[in-house]
Amino acid sequence: MTPPPTTVPTVTLSDGEQIPQLGFGVFQVPPRDTADVTTRALLAGYRHIDTASAYRNEAGVGQAVHAAGLQRDDVYITTKCFNDDHGFDQAKRALRASLDRLETDHVDLYLIHWPVPSTDKYVDTWKAFVELQQEGLTRSIGVSNFQPAHLDRIIAETGVTPAVNQIELHPYFQQAGLRRDHADLGIVTEAWSPLAQGRVLDEPAITAIAEAHGKSAGQVVIRWHLQLGNVVFPKSVTQERIEQNFDVFDFHLSADEMAAIDALDGGGRIGPDPDTFVRP
Ligand code: NDP
């Protein structure tokens, strides 16, 4: 496979590792299609794939990375430990099972997918993550959907701060307070459902900016994330969108344009509430 046409900026994590700021998400990509869709993403230039055991498509991601003939270090792979794999021993087994499905000896980033406070096992799970990183099975460790109280607790009880927190974040739900907490703690913000699963794309403030730049609404929203400093991995199974979502490095939003998108905040979550979410 030829090198990517575009150099994606990287963000440095607190552990010194580098993560490509733009990646490709495979949530809701059907398992049988995942190898093909991921191959098309790699061909378009993406070198960062965000999957999870709960998506049931890690095997397709692994197949695509192998078939591409890329060096393992050329692709950044994130996967996640799901809710029924919480607990010290269970989490350790869960990563090994993910590595088998991905056909690799390590991932770049392993995340606790949800805190599941009702089972109260996320601290033990985090202790397992600290060891998994020391064992070299994952280069970096982080969390997803953690609220401030969950972050404070794992840091207080282990002394180890997650490298990232992957949270729902899009123009309708901007999480400014949590982003500030992340900045204070040295945690990189990853934005999931960055396009609000398409719901923000007809918003007149966004389509007007898109028209002014000769870009699509999706490209404008991805650009907004990148300029905020978020790590972002839009999902698409559509060839034109896969390519379009990667073609976001030849324009820049002005401060006024950023502010116009900032003003759309307030629509609330489209996904589950992390304080109560237990299962999909
Ligand atoms: P996104 O915000 O990325 O939106 C995906 C939807 O938008 C799809 O329906 C897609 O359609 C459509 N779309 C994509 N690009 C465009 C475009 N340029 N123009 C118009 N429509 C477009 O939603 P996701 O929920 O998939 O989030 C992205 C990733 O975030 C996931 O794949 C996953 O990796 C991660 N995630 C993590 C969660 C967590 O709990 N940690 C929860 C949810 C997501 P189509 O595919 O038909 O082209």
Image (cartoon, helix red, strand yellow):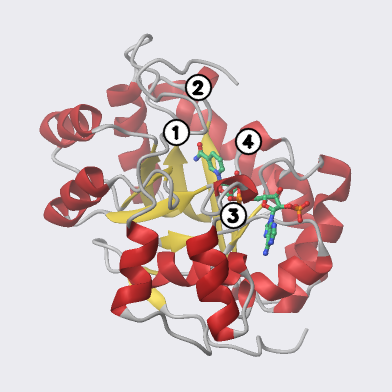
Check disc 2 and report the residue beneath it: 83
Does residue 272 sit above or below 209 in this rendering? above
Q: Nearer the viewer's eye, disc 3 or disc 4? A: 4
Q: CA distance from mark 2 to mark 3?
A: 23 Å
Mark 1, residue position: 269
Q: Which residue is mark 4?
A: 53
* Residue at 41 percent of width and 76 percent of height: 10
Circle 2 packing at 10 Å, graded few (<14), some (14-19), many (20+), is many
In this view of the protein, which residue sits in the foreground, 138 or 170? 170
Disc 4: CA contacts within 10 A as few (<14), some (14-19) or many (>=20): many
Q: Residues within 10 Å of mark 3 (few under 14, many from 20)?
A: few
Is 195 situated left or right of 273 in this image?
A: right
Q: Which residue is mark 3?
A: 105
Query: How many marks overall?
Result: 4
Between disc 1 and disc 2, whose residue precedes?
A: 2
Dot 3 amino acid type: Asp
Q: Residue 249: tell me if it is visible.
A: yes
- The correct choice, above or below, for 54 with respect to 14 in the image is above
- Circles 4 and 1, Cβ within 8 Å, touching? The answer is no
Q: Mark 3 vs mark 4: which is more N-terminal?
A: 4
Which residue corresponds to the image point at 51% horizontal and 31% vertical from the top-left? 271
Marks 3/4: CA–CA distance: 16 Å
Give the label, 1 or 3, closer to the camera.
Answer: 1
Q: Earlier in the sequence, mark 2 or mark 4?
A: 4
Structural distance between the alpha carbons of marks 4 and 1: 23 Å
* C-alpha separation, residue under disc 1 versus residue under disc 2: 20 Å
x, y (%) of residue 1?
78, 83
